[in-house]
């Protein structure tokens, strides 16, 4: 009996140990959310609204929100219809603050290599992520590079290595200066911001702030500070330890990481942590009532309401609503290949507010986030598209449109899953037959030709009637002009018509008299030969492509950009130039340049071109990203 009890005790102990180990493993795998953030929203597909959210744990790590339960309220009213609908690429801002006293000058090449390694395709996504570089100064931070979204900008900063500081510097004041101005330098509202301080941790004396103010202020703003310690050879061991300890405290107090700078490869873990915040989770819900204006949205954890975030969304009053009509059972198809374009048919439903139906001005189909095809707004309810950007697995379809008031609306994304196999396309999205397409096209051409014919006949009839009435005395016999003059609001118009007729008669008489003389000789030189007016042109100073050295401005409007399909002059090999970057338009005797909402802006003599454009003068230097041009007007 004693042996059996002893054996039972051992078995129970083993089972309890196994349960404890498995429980601790699952607890370790499940991250605990410490804070929740909303970085932005999209209401173009209202009543479906997308919120971009992310969360962090107690150590500042990005938390996977898959499977999390939330409570969503709009204007204090609970929203029951919500879902997690994938990820949104929102981008990040990483601010580097470097402190280079004389004792760490040997680390300058490693500092440059570490920052440029981060600002490469391995970590930074160009035009989504931003990098700013500042240096610790005597009174505050000195700007080396304002937040920029291009790799080349970071490389240009280090074209000449920075020299060590020779005087006193203010580490705390410099970092506090950045924190207090973070909203001004942040490229987009609520974009996740990370600060990376590279320093030996000394020179923390300040007349404006206390050392402990730094982590407190960063924690208030939700900005983690990651610290990289430099071994200053000019400091004693005690001072080195004090500086290293202070940097560790700053990082711990802001949920940041801390490390030593030995090689650029050791920064991989830190860079991965920062870039994990680029993609936020899409929380999609349906609004309870489509009322235009600003609305307050609150999102919190279902199990812990004290952890949540708040944001404001704006619903456009009077905007139309549009949806893709694809039945649920038609959202899966099989294709033997996705390398060739696939012809699909789509149906949409467009509804307008009660204040009256308006019109759509433009529309396009977007597949997997890529513009696939423009849509004729007259055929938006039923249209076909040849799609060449499909992949096996999930494919996201969305129709985006603009109405005549400039409101941007979009359908909620619909996912169509494509499997590999013999091609089978559901009837709901299968294209019409060749005969139907030919018949529809023939009928369309017939309507167009018939309409043009009727318009021409109407114009001819109108011309004949006007000429007849102009030569006939019938209107005068019926006293039509006298009747018009008797109507008070038509008197001024009739007088203007009389003056216009008199001016026309005088012009015709002058033209007949002038026809007896020699042709106009305006613009001829002394020998009687024609002399063409010199053409203004652009002189290409710098570009990474094979563009010509001279671009003649011999048309009224020239579009400059990266897209060879959309731009008249394309710098297709230069990634710093937007698809349509800027436009140059003839104005009077010169030209005016306009920026077309480009990512990096258009600059003339290093002055940013404002929205109304900028008049060009001979010798002006134009910069589009990394492309440089000079305007010449002979």
Image (cartoon, rainbow, N blue to C red):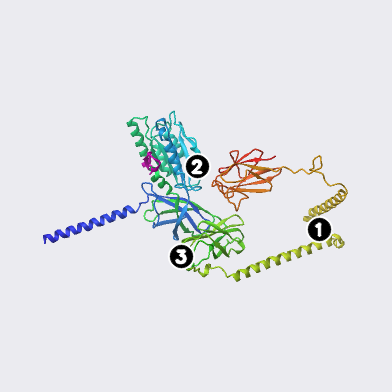
Say whether residue 218 is left or right of residue 462: left
Magenta stretch: give its range.
Answer: 250-265
Total numbered labels: 3
Mark 1 — residue? 484
Task: Please tell me which residue is depicted at 53% across the width and 60% down the height of the picture.
Answer: 388
| Mark 1 and mark 3: Cα distance apart in space | 76 Å
Q: Is residue 318 above or below residue 218?
A: below
Disc assigned to residue 551: none
Which is nearer the eye, 529 or 508?
529
| Mark 2 and mark 1: Cα distance apart in space | 67 Å
Q: Give how far across and how far down residue 628 sits, in percent.
A: 59, 41
SS class of the residue under badge 3?
strand
Farthest left residue in view: 1
Mark 2 — residue? 147
Count neighbours of disc 3 (C-alpha within 10 A) and say few if under 14, some if 14 to 19, many if 20 or more: some
SS class of the residue under badge 1?
helix
| Mark 2 and mark 3: Cα distance apart in space | 44 Å
Q: Quadrant of residue 22?
A: bottom left
Q: Give how far across and how far down residue 243 sits, in percent.
A: 36, 34
Whether residue 77 can be seen here = no
Mark 3 — residue? 420
Task: Please tell me which residue is depicted at 44% across the width and 56% down the height of the picture.
Answer: 72
Mark 2 and mark 1 lie on one chain; the one further toward the N terminus is 2
């Amino acid at each position: 009996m004693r042996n059996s009890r002893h054996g039972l005790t051992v078995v129970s102990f083993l089972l309890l140990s196994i349960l404890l180990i498995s429980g601790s493993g699952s607890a370790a795998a499940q991250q605990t959310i410490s804070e929740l953030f909303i970085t932005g929203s999209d209401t173009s597909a209202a009543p479906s609204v997308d919120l971009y959210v992310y969360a962090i744990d107690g150590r500042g790590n990005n938390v996977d929100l898959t499977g999390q339960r939330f409570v969503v309220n709009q204007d204090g009213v609970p929203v029951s219809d919500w879902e997690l609908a994938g990820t949104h690429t929102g981008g990040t801002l990483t601010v580097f603050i470097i402190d280079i006293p004389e004792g760490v000058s040997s680390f300058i090449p490693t500092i440059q290599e570490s920052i440029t390694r981060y600002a490469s395709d391995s970590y930074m996504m160009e035009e989504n992520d931003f990098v700013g570089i500042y240096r610790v100064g005597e009174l505050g931070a000195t700007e080396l590079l304002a937040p920029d979204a291009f790799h080349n900008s970071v490389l240009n900063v280090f074209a000449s290595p920075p020299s060590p500081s020779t005087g006193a510097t203010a580490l705390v004041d410099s970092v506090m200066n950045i924190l207090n101005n973070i909203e001004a330098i942040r490229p987009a509202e609520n974009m996740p911001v990370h600060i990376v301080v590279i320093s030996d941790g000394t020179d923390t004396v300040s007349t404006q702030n206390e050392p402990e103010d730094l982590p407190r202020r960063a924690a208030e703003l939700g900005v983690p500070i990651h610290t990289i310690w430099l071994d200053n050879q000019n400091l004693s061991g005690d001072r080195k330890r004090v500086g290293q300890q202070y940097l560790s405290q700053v990082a711990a107090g802001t949920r940041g990481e801390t490390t030593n700078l030995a090689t650029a490869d050791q920064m991989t873990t830190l860079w991965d942590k920062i870039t994990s915040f680029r993609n936020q989770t899409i929380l999609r819900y349906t609004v309870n009532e489509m009322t235009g204006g600003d609305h307050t949205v609150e999102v919190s954890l279902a199990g812990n309401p004290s952890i949540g975030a708040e944001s404001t969304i704006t619903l456009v009053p009077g905007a139309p609503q549009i949806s893709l009509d694809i039945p649920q059972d038609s959202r899966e198809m099989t294709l033997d290949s996705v390398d060739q374009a696939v012809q699909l048919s789509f149906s949409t439903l467009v509804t307008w507010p009660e204040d009256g139906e308006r019109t759509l001005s433009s529309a396009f189909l977007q597949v997997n986030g890529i513009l696939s095809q423009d849509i004729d707004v007259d055929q938006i309810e039923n249209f076909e598209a040849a799609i060449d950007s499909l992949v096996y697995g999930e494919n996201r379809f969305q129709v985006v449109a603009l109405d005549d008031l400039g409101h941007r609306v979009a359908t909620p994304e619909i996912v169509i899953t494509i499997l590999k196999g013999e091609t089978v396309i559901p009837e709901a999205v299968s294209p019409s037959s060749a005969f139907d397409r030919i018949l529809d096209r023939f009928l369309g051409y017939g309507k167009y030709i018939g309409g043009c014919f009727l318009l021409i006949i109407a114009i001819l009839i109108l011309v004949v009637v006007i000429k007849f009435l102009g030569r006939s005395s019938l209107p005068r016999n019926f006293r039509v002009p006298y009747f018009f003059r008797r109507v008070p609001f038509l008197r001024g118009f009739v007088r203007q018509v009389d003056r216009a007729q008199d001016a026309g008669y005088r012009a015709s008489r002058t033209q007949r008299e002038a026809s007896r003389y020699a042709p106009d000789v305006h613009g001829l030189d002394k020998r009687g030969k024609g002399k063409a007016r010199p053409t203004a042109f652009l002189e290409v100073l710098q570009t990474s492509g094979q563009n010509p050295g001279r671009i003649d401005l011999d048309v009224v409007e020239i579009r400059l950009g990266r897209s060879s399909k959309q731009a008249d002059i394309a710098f297709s090999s230069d990634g710093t130039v937007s698809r349509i970057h800027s436009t140059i338009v003839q104005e009077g005797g010169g030209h005016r340049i306009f920026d077309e909402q480009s990512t990096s802006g258009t600059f003339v003599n290093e002055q940013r071109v404002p929205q109304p454009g900028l008049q060009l003068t001979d010798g002006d230097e134009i910069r589009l990203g990394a492309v440089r041009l000079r305007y010449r007007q002979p």
